[in-house]
Image (tube, grey):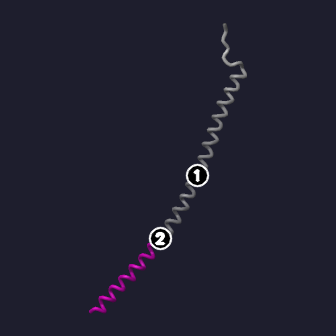
Amino acid sequence: MIDNQLELRVRQLEEWKAEQNTNAAVRVERDRHMDGRFDRLENGVSEVKGYLLRIVWVIVLGIVGSLLTFMLGGGINLVP
C-alpha cells in the first residue's frame, strides 16, 4: 500500500516536472518571439523619429528663410 502511494506520488512528480520543462521551453520561445517584435517596433519608432526630425528641420528652415527674405526685402516699410 505504501509502495503504491509512493509510486503514485513519484509518477505525479515526474509528470509535473515534465510539464514544467515544457512550460519553460514554451516561455523561452514566446520571449524570443516577443523580443523580435519589440526590436522591429523599436526600429519603426526610430524611423518615424528620424522623419519627424526632418520635418521639424524643414519647418525651422522655412521660418528662418522667410524671416531673412522679410529682412532683406526691407522689413516693415512705414510711409510717412
The residue lying furthest to the right in this view is 72
The answer to whether 39 appears left or right of 7 in the picture is right
Task: Tell me the quarter of the image containing the N terminus.
Answer: bottom left
Screen quadrant of the C terminus: top right
Instruction: Please give the name of the residue rendered at 38% of the width and 79% of the height, measured from the top-left corner.
Output: 16
Relative to residue 66, is residue 1 depicted above or below?
Answer: below
Q: Which residue is mark 2?
A: 26
Residue 55 occupies which quadrant of the picture?
top right
Q: Secondary structure at mark 1?
A: helix
Magenta stretch containing residue 10, yes or no?
yes
Cα distance in 3D space between marks 1 and 2: 27 Å
Instruction: Identify whether 52 is placed above or below 17.
Output: above
Q: Secondary structure at mark 2?
A: helix
Q: Label 1: how many residues lie within 10 Å, few (<14), some (14-19) or many (20+)?
A: few
Q: Position of residue 66 (x, y in %)?
A: 67, 27
The residue type indicated by label 2 comes to Val
Q: Which residues are magenta?
A: 1-23
Specify the quadrant of the image occupied by residue 72: top right
Mark before the other along the chain sequence, 1 or 2: 2
Crowding around mark 2 (Cα neighbors within 10 Å: few <14, some 14 to 19, many 20+) is few
Residue 12, x across and y down, in percent: 35, 82
Q: Is residue 80 magenta?
A: no
Question: What residue is disc 1 on?
Answer: 44
Residue at 41% over, 76% down: 19
Please determine whether, in this image, residue 24 is positioned above or below residue 66: below
Vertical comparison of 29 with 41: above or below? below
Looking at the image, the residue that sits furthest to the top is: 80
Residue 23 x/y as whole percent:
44, 72
Q: Residue at x 33, y 85 (%)?
A: 9
**Magenta part, dominant SS:** helix
Whole-percent x and y of residue 11? 36, 85
Amino acid at pointer 1: Gly
